[in-house]
Amino acid sequence: MRKATLKDTKLITTILTDSFKTNKSIINVTRKGRNQLKRINLLMKFFFLNAYHNGDVFLSDDEKACIMLLTNEKKRKSLFVKLQFILWNINLFFNVLGVKNVRNVLQREKAINQNHPKEPFLHLYYVGVLSKYQGNGIGTKLISETINYYEEYKIVYLETSNERNIPLYEKLGFEVVNVHSELEITLYIMKKKL
């Protein structure tokens, strides 16, 4: 695996869009109608830039998978990056989510954040594998390599709205610690102690 750079934006966005284009949770928060795939692509670009500036992004050696992690440690950002985030959020609001979906996103973020501890932790933000390579262990290997990379953290969190993913995460040592069924999409919060 290698750490991604901003030069990898298009590659990462392509992997994530391909991985999540049929994901109910992602479809649920993007504005419906024509060009929904384009909006999903813009959302994935936002996720990449958020992870790049608030954590780390890694690519598998074969560049068929990526993983994004966030930390709860505050990184110092330049004024330029802060202004970019404001513009990205405005773009996200008007061009990707739409007014109707903002409430869903805010509820989801609140549910996720209430499960996080105050101590340092990793948040496994998104893992994507190009769809034609899924099921070959690429994502599992990347998750394991990435977790091993972070020796200083004691806890890793993730959330999934796809029940099908739970056995995979359990094989990697995660356990379900909370279920949010009050949201439009059921959200499973999982944790692993390192």
Image (tube, rainbow, N blue to C red):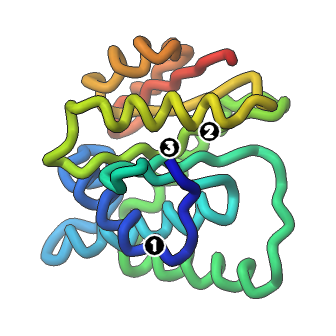
The answer to the question of whether label 2 and label 1 lie on touching residues, with beta carbons closer than 8 A, is no
Location of mark 1 (residue): 9
Q: Secondary structure at mark 3?
A: helix
Task: Name the amino acid, label 1.
Answer: Thr
Q: Secondary structure at mark 1?
A: helix
Is label 2 in a helix, a strand or a loop?
Answer: strand
Residue at 32%, 69% (x, y): give it. 41
Residue at (46% x, 20% y) in the render: 179
* Residue 185 rendering spot, x and y as whole percentages: 33, 36
The answer to whether residue 115 is seen in the rendering is yes
Earlier residue among tags 1 and 3: 1
Residue extending furthest toward the front: 61
| Label tally | 3
- Quadrant of the snapshot with the C terminus: top right
Q: What residue did someone put label 2 on? A: 123
User: Residue 83: horizontal and vertical position, in percent?
Assistant: 71, 85
> On the rendered structure, is 150 left or right of 88?
right
- Confirm or deny contact between disc 1 and disc 3 (CB under 8 A): no
